[in-house]
Image (cartoon, grey):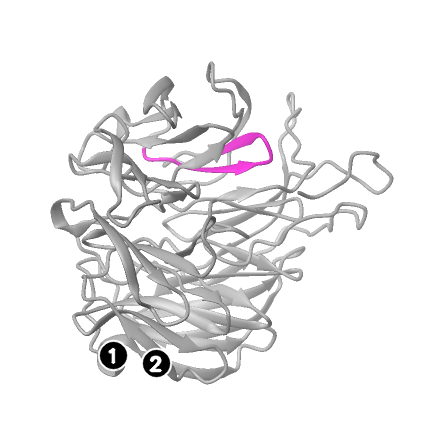
Amino acid sequence: MRSSITLALVFGQLISVGLRADDWPAYGGPRGNHVSTEKGLRTDWGDEEPQRLWSLDVGLGYSSVVEVGGRAYTQGYAKAKNTLLCVEASSGRILWNHQYPCEKADKYFPGGSRGTPAIHDGTLYLNSHQGDFYALDAETGKILWAKNLPKDFGGRRPTWGYSGSPLVTDGKVILETGSEKGSVIALDTETGNLKWRAGSHGAAYASPLQRAGPEGEFMVFNEYGLVFHRLSDGFELRKYQHRTRFGINAAQPLDMGASVLISSAYGKGAALVDVGRSRPKALWESESFSCQMASLVRFDSFAFGIHGQTGGREDQSSLFCMEIAKGKKRWEKKGFGLATVILVSDKLVILSDRGELVLARANPFKFEELASFQALPGKTNWTPPTYANGRMHCKGSQGKWVCLEMGSIRQGDSDAGGG
């Protein structure tokens, strides 16, 4: 980003210990589906605005924020380096940082950091868009082990660099290399030693995701399309082709067990894929739901997302509601550009590409706005917000990281509870 790392601390305030809440430990939240079941998101703002707890300038890029155990983490690019920051989530006080050399890689967009860290059992795992991979102590920032995907595993970087975040589960760190001799690998969480490698497809820009349905499976949305692997040894179980121009599959698949909803831009659109068979088959396909970067979120039998892509027509993009089983559009609303969407309980949180934060009901019958605020400056704000412990983290492409207090439940409230 054009700004260097400078502290713009305003003030901090912890939400009450009476609120049972969820941390947000990886890209897409606790379950990787951009959904928080945390209760207490305030929506009745009237003429008020959320309290800005603090803000930081962290450097150019699109890495999102994770929050675990009262600490928040993200990374940004400045002066030929990526910087991973660990801050006190309540105040924004910087606790430690880790810097490493990295290219800006601004191919047709501003460039900067891409991947979001993942935290598991006190260890932070981080991939750079060039393929430098680190395991660090989440409390101190000490490097525990490191790898380089191209050098150590023959990885092939996709055109816009590695952007997916690691999947950490069952003692394994799973990530894409794009290598013809192991496009997906599993590393030991403690040592970084290779446990297995599998597949030959080129890497794309989504993150590996553990299945919500069958145990012992995970899936990747790569250059080929949707590919399912066995967790124990990486064996390729089945796959569904969904190729786009430039190999760009970036939005996270939406896993519903027997079926998976996928969407891409570049003329490809969406498909609901029946994956409960040896050869997955599309139940329907539609170009009306083309999600270039922003992942879909699900509420009951409906999905909400952003249709559109870059290239001069961003202002024609629209927020939509889809009936998943039929692939039928229920409604659409323009005015958010290439926004991002997360779901908090039964509320949509939309961050427009121009930095407006909008709260709306997850209403399948009509768009129902509840509140809106200007959270970030600038354009091309394509990073999804993070909601954890009553705090909304919004991070802009030009480096502004803003933390807003948006939880309303206090100690003694009768409806406090987590999902």
Q: Is residue 267 above or below residue 107?
A: above
Image quarter of the N terminus: bottom left
- For the residue labelled by badge 2, is the local secondary structure a helix, a strand or a loop? strand
Residue at image point 46% right, 68% down: 84
Residue at image point 36% right, 72% down: 233
Residue at image point 67% right, 55% down: 90
Q: Cα distance, mark 2 to mark 1? A: 9 Å
Q: Which residue is mark 2?
A: 147
Residue 13, x across and y down, in percent: 72, 50
Residue 326, x across and y down, in percent: 34, 23
Give the side of residue 142 with respect to residue 236, left or right: right
Q: Are marks 2 and 1 in contact (CB under 8 Å)?
A: yes
The amino acid sitting under disc 1 is Phe
Residue 356 at least partly seen: no
Magenta range is: 338-350
Q: Is residue 212 above or below residue 199?
A: above
Number of callouts: 2
Residue 232 at least partly seen: yes
Q: Which residue is mark 1?
A: 153
Q: Earlier in the sequence, mark 2 or mark 1?
A: 2
Residue 40, x across and y down, in percent: 69, 36
Give the side of residue 120 with respect to residue 42, left or right: left
- For the residue labelled by badge 1, is the local secondary structure a helix, a strand or a loop? helix
Give the side of residue 373 with respect to residue 102, left or right: right
Magenta stretch, main secondary structure, is strand
Residue at image point 32% right, 39% down: 274
